[in-house]
């Protein structure tokens, strides 16, 4: 395969080690009749080409088997291809959830006797494509999100959002257990005695109640709680409580709740009202292969959906898994003794970053110890090294579900199910709800949450890594009445004073020469920088702080913005910035209409003469349409902190040019040419900020 430019392959048919963490689903539980890839070729950590060995004299894989494998691999939500290697030839097949697309695509033969040495590069950069590939940037996410949206819409107003969340989440969790073969038909009587098969366990109130009791008893009562009685030791009381809940749900929804739960279990397509049919739909999905990161993305968007009244102001937006993965991996790469790092996401949402950090810690333990972590090690990592704060109960419930599923997913021993029981609830030990108890904050817009004084001091200086995607959205009123707008302005003014106080407190503690904390003002009612400054209090001295942030922090040229940027660069030792301004409004981060960046720093004031790496990935349409981007070493530029302070416009210039453009701008500045704003004012022309 080196003839077409492939790097070293990762074998998938041997004994698993730490490098195989993302491919365990393809290596475990293989049956002789299953066709699975023998190897995979990656580019920058992404699978590009799965390979099936057709070189031996054994029975060759049939065309039907290969297309079936292409559909199975599509569950992994990757823009990869499948290749069958035969003597002198590589045959490329698409990977797609749609069997119709797969069956209609003609395989692409590639000669290995007269190979194209740049073929793999073309596959990796999206310049080479084949018939039948999915066109959507995140096709598995889109499909699952659409199906859950249908269920949520059909049940809205009949059940509370939290009830819909918990019931649907339990069905998804059971489907995960079923597809992973963690539960077997022989256990049906123990799970739900009246069910006809394992896909019948949520078909009515009696069956659903029994199944919910079994889930609580087998795993943990913290798993998407539905009734208060889960805490009771008496199984009869718990079963009675679930029967009551599901009978009421049946009555509220005219029985539709069970149709939607069966749709998840049996692969039914909702056609509207109470009509369902079996087709390629939920049954497309094999939850043995869908990455939990994709499910976390879906969960995050439903946090947004269920908090729609405050979503824009409270910045409830999911982080794409590719962006989150890069931030987590780079943050932990800079941590000292990374496998033992204690990690905090202070605005964790449904747990996208926590899940990825959890998996990365498991990988690092595996590498260090040389053996796959067992259940006890996995639980120890989860309960000791992962922490998440948020203000949304739906989000925290989904984060708990995502972490539970991850712990089961990476466990090498999953039978019988009772050995997977979690020792304690996650909420209150791993996950913390810091929603405001004040009625005015709880019901209208942004609340301080993790930034408030309710967060115990015991968390200060406790974390080796603080990371995530804190709220970005500027506080502004969306009220419809004059009285509400006046109240919002007062509330926002008060809150921005809190933002400024948090920032000044952190700057005072750092005692930076030449920087006066009392002069610092938080820019424009934005909550993002206060999270960065609060992170300096949560992180240990020298710990890692890594956040996805709006690029305006490095681009803004107003007086307040410039001072805030200087304080940031001097108060932290910034090690790197990935400036994604050129990826704005692309599928890399769908529905994000602001330029963004990834900030990496150490929690210590910058030393004299400090430099950091500034990287600006270029928009490559062939990649961005797949929600991907490439980091080229040539786009990385070392930048002096002193130069950035002296030239506030420098990072904005480097974002669209090179160091040569900085030199050109220096020469222009020497000429003292008046800027456009000065000319505009001198001529008495009107100006304003359109976005305000």
Image (cartoon, grey):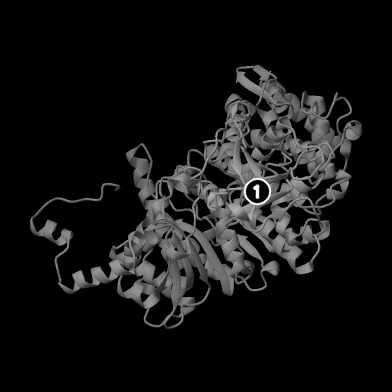
User: Horizontal and vertical percent for residue 619?
Assistant: 41, 51
Within the image, what quadrant is residue 62 found in?
top right
Residue 397 appears in the figure: no
Q: Which residue is mark 1?
A: 399
User: Horizontal and vertical percent for residue 278?
Assistant: 69, 20
Q: Residue at x 86, y 44 (%)?
A: 417
Toward the viewer: 555 or 102? 102
Does 267 sit left or right of 329 as displayed? right
Toward the viewer: 128 or 60? 60
Toward the viewer: 323 or 126? 126
Does 201 sit left or right of 544 as displayed? right
Does 582 sit left or right of 331 as displayed? left
**Is disc 1 placed on a helix, strand or loop?**
helix
Counting the numbered discs, the total is 1
Within the image, what quadrant is residue 228 found in?
top right
User: Horizontal and vertical percent for residue 505?
Assistant: 47, 71
Q: Residue at x 56, y 57 (%)?
A: 326
Residue 307 appears in the figure: yes
Within the image, what quadrant is residue 608 found in?
bottom left
Task: Look at the picture and state if 408 lies above or below 367.
Answer: above
Q: Residues within 10 Å of mark 1 (few under 14, many from 20)?
A: many
Residue that sits furthest to the front in the current view? 113
Task: Look at the picture and state if 155 lies above or below 172.
Answer: above
Q: Residue at x 48, y 47 (%)?
A: 623
User: Horizontal and vertical percent for residue 48?
Assistant: 60, 48
């Amino acid at each position: 395969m080196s003839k077409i430019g492939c790097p070293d392959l990762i074998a998938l048919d041997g004994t698993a080690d730490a490098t195989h963490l993302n491919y365990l689903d393809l290596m475990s539980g293989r049956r002789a009749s299953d066709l699975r890839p023998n190897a995979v070729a990656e580019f920058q950590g992404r699978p590009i080409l799965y390979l099936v060995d057709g070189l031996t004299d054994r029975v060759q894989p049939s065309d039907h088997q290969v297309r079936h494998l292409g559909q199975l691999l599509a569950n992994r939500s990757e823009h990869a291809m499948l290749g069958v290697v035969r003597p002198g030839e590589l045959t490329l097949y698409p990977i797609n959830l749609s069997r119709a697309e797969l069956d209609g695509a003609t395989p692409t033969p590639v000669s290995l006797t007269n190979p194209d040495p740049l073929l793999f590069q073309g596959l990796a950069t999206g310049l080479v494509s084949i018939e039948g590939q999915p066109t959507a940037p995140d096709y598995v996410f889109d499909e699952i999100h659409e199906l859950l949206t249908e269920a949520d819409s059909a049940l809205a107003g009949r059940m509370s959002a939290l009830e819909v969340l918990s019931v649907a989440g339990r069905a998804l969790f059971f489907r995960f257990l079923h597809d992973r073969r963690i539960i077997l038909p022989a256990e049906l009587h123990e799970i739900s005695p009246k069910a006809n098969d394992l896909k019948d366990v949520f078909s009515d109130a009696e069956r659903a109640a029994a199944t919910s009791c079994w889930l609580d008893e087998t795993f943990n009562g913290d798993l998407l709680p539905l009734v208060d009685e889960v805490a009771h030791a008496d199984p009869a009381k718990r079963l009675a409580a679930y029967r009551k809940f599901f009978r009421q749900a049946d009555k509220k929804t005219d029985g539709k709740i069970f149709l939607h739960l069966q749709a998840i279990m049996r692969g039914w397509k909702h056609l509207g009202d109470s009509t369902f049919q079996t087709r390629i739909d939920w049954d497309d999905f094999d939850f043995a292969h869908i990455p939990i990161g994709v499910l976390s993305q879906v969960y995050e968007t439903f946090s947004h959906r269920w908090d729609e009244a405050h979503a824009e102001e409270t910045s409830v937006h999911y982080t794409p898994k590719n962006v989150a993965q890069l931030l987590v991996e780079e943050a932990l790469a800079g941590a000292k003794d990374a496998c033992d790092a204690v990690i905090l996401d202070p605005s964790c949402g449904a747990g996208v970053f926590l899940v990825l950090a959890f998996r990365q810690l498991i990988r690092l333990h595996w590498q260090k110890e040389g053996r796959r972590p067992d259940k006890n090690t996995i639980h120890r990592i989860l309960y000791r090294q992962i922490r998440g704060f948020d203000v949304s109960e739906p989000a925290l419930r989904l984060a708990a579900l995502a972490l539970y599923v991850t712990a089961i997913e990476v466990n090498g021993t999953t039978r019988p199910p009772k050995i997977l029981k979690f020792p304690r609830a996650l909420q209150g030990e791993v996950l913390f709800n810091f929603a405001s108890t004040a009625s005015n904050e709880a019901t209208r817009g942004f609340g301080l949450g993790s930034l408030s004084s309710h967060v115990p001091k015991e968390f200060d200086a406790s974390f080796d890594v603080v990371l995530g995607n804190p709220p970005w959205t500027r506080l502004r009123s969306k009220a419809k009445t004059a009285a509400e707008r006046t109240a919002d302005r007062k509330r926002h003014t008060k809150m921005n004073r809190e933002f400024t106080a948090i920032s000044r407190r952190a700057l005072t503690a750092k005692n930076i020469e030449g920087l006066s904390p009392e002069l610092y003002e938080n820019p424009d009612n934005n909550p993002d920088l206060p999270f960065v400054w609060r992170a300096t209090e949560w992180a240990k001295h020298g710990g890692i702080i890594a956040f996805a942030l709006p690029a305006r922090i490095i681009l803004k040229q107003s007086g307040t913005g410039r001072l805030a940027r200087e304080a940031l660069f001097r108060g932290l030792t910034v090690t790197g910035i990935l400036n994604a301004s050129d990826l704005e409004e692309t599928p890399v981060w769908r529905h994000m209409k602001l330029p963004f960046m990834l900030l990496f720093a150490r929690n210590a004031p910058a030393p004299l003469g400090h430099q950091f790496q500034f990287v600006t990935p270029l928009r490559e349409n062939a990649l961005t349409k797949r929600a991907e981007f490439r980091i080229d070493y040539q786009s990385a530029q070392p930048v002096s902190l002193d130069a950035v302070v002296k030239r506030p416009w420098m990072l904005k210039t480097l974002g669209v040019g090179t160091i040569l453009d900085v030199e050109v701008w220096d020469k222009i500045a020497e000429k003292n040419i008046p800027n456009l704003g000065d000319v505009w004012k001198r001529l008495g022309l009107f100006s304003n900020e359109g976005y305000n």
